[in-house]
Amino acid sequence: MTKRIMIAALLVLIAGMAYAKGMEVTKKAGGNTVTITLRNDPPVTGENAIAVIVKDAAGKAVTDAKVVVDYGMPAMPGMPAMKYKEDTAFKDGKYTGTLNFSMPGSWYVNVKVGKAGKTNTAKLNVDVR
């Protein structure tokens, strides 16, 4: 019995360590607090899962917003700007989606939270490897 408990505890610890590798940032978007989690820290070229939790000014979860992530890379010499858009789906208390960074470098990520005819944005920059 003790051996099973130790194995279970070890598995929980490993799972927690794997999740802890993600990047988490909390920003304001209007009156909302937006917590953005990217599965990879630092983000990597290719697919990166994103999860967004939105809370109102009272700290209550916002479950009926439209959350869209605009992300891209500014123009550089010899290369036009890149702009992408990811609609999210609400499930298990989070708005989730996948960002596909096509190359390493500095990218902007704008999480737009729309509700009641207003849209507020939480902005961050990430260094994709």
Image: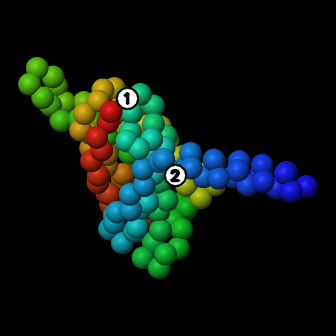
Q: Write the residue at 33% across / 66% down.
A: 28
**Relative height, residue 95 to residue 28 (above, below):** above
Task: Name the spot of residue 16 as percent of width and height, x first.
Answer: 60, 52
Nearer to me, 38 or 22:
22
| SS for callout 2 | helix
Q: Write the residue at 8% across / 25% down.
A: 77
Q: Write the residue at 53% across / 60% down.
A: 64
- Residue at the left extreme? 77
Which quadrant does the N terminus fall into?
bottom right
- Residue at the bottom extreme? 58
Q: Write the residue at 49% across / 75% down.
A: 59
Q: Which mark is residue 86?
A: none
* Residue wearing tag 2: 20
Which quadrant does the C terminus fall into?
top left
Is 20 displayed left or right of 5 in the figure? left
- Report the Cα–Cα distance between label 2 and label 1: 20 Å
Q: Which mark is residue 45?
A: 1
Amino acid bearing label 1: Thr
Amino acid bearing label 2: Ala
Crowding near the residue tagged with mark 1, few <14, some 14–19, many ≥20 C-alpha atoms within 10 Å: some
Nearer to me, 94 or 3:
3
- Mark 2–mark 1 contact, CB under 8 Å? no
Is 23 displayed left or right of 128 in the figure? right
Front disc: 2 or 1: 2
Residue 46 in sight from this viewpoint: yes
**Relative height, residue 12 to residue 101 (above, below):** below
| SS for callout 1 | loop
Is 123 displayed left or right of 49 in the figure? left
